[in-house]
Image (cartoon, rainbow, N blue to C red):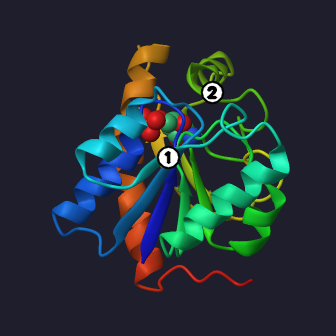
Amino acid sequence: MNIAFFASHRGSNMQAVIDAVNTGRLNARPCVVISNNGDSEALEKAQQSGIPNYHLSSKTHPDPGELDDEILNILEGHRTDWIVLAGYMKKLGPKVLQKYKGRIINIHPSLLPKYGGRGMYGVAVHEAVIAAGEKETGVTIHLVDEEYDHGEILAQCTVPILQDDTVESLSRRVLEREHVFLAETLERIARGEIIIEN
Ligand code: GRF
């Protein structure tokens, strides 16, 4: 299972998957990392791990069709089987979406369909969860389609909200859970325990 990662900033989920591969918890190979942000920590982390990495964005390819073509070329050149969006702030182009349909997943820090969609990322998610007085939140891993946070849900786990939780403490606890859950879910996909019907 060759995995391509897309990440815009920190890349801690990507790193957690790389660590799971390196410690034998996940039978997969990170084959390429793509970021729309040339200064992202995600690209630095890829370099440190010796994974081929590319900055591809409207800066490098002002024409969206050409950007879509180039991303597809690179994915195919690195023999990508699965795409993992791990904090990727852009939408994928139609050619990549079509070519990898049913093999693109995203991780989101809430129990979708709650607290997802445009603008619902980073602390905004946890702020909304706390403001609504929820007793629990969680992590969702879902297939990617043309809409933000919208495709079929493949796996979810819950995270309790404690009485004295702040946005910071909750963000931290959900992120820790994400790191474990993403690698576990990829391993279940690799083993064929999660069946995806195209
Ligand atoms: C994570 O919370 C993920 O669920 C969301 O964006 C964040 C990315 O964090 N899609 P990181 O870049 O993996 O540290």
Q: Looking at the image, which is closer to me, 21 or 38?
A: 38
| Residue in view at x 73 percent, y 35 percent | 58
Q: What is the crowding at mark 1: few (fewer than 14 residues within 10 Å), some, or many (at least 20)? A: some
The three-letter code of the residue at mark 2 reads Val
Tell whether 96 sits left or right of 179: right
Q: Residue at 47% x, 86% y: name it.
A: 192
Element carrying mark 1: strand
Q: Nearer the viewer, mark 1 or mark 2?
A: 1
State how many labels appear.
2
Mark 2: C-beta under 8 Å from nearest atom of ligand 1: yes
- Disc 1 and disc 2 in contact, CB within 8 angstroms: no
Q: Which mark is residue 54?
A: 1
Give the image location of residue 130, x and y in percent: 59, 20
Q: Quadrant of the C terminus?
A: bottom right
Q: Nearer the viewer, residue 157 or 86?
A: 86
Q: Is residue 75 visible?
A: yes
Camera sees residue 143: no
N-terminal of the pair, mark 1 or mark 2, is 1
Quarter of the figure with residue 166: top left
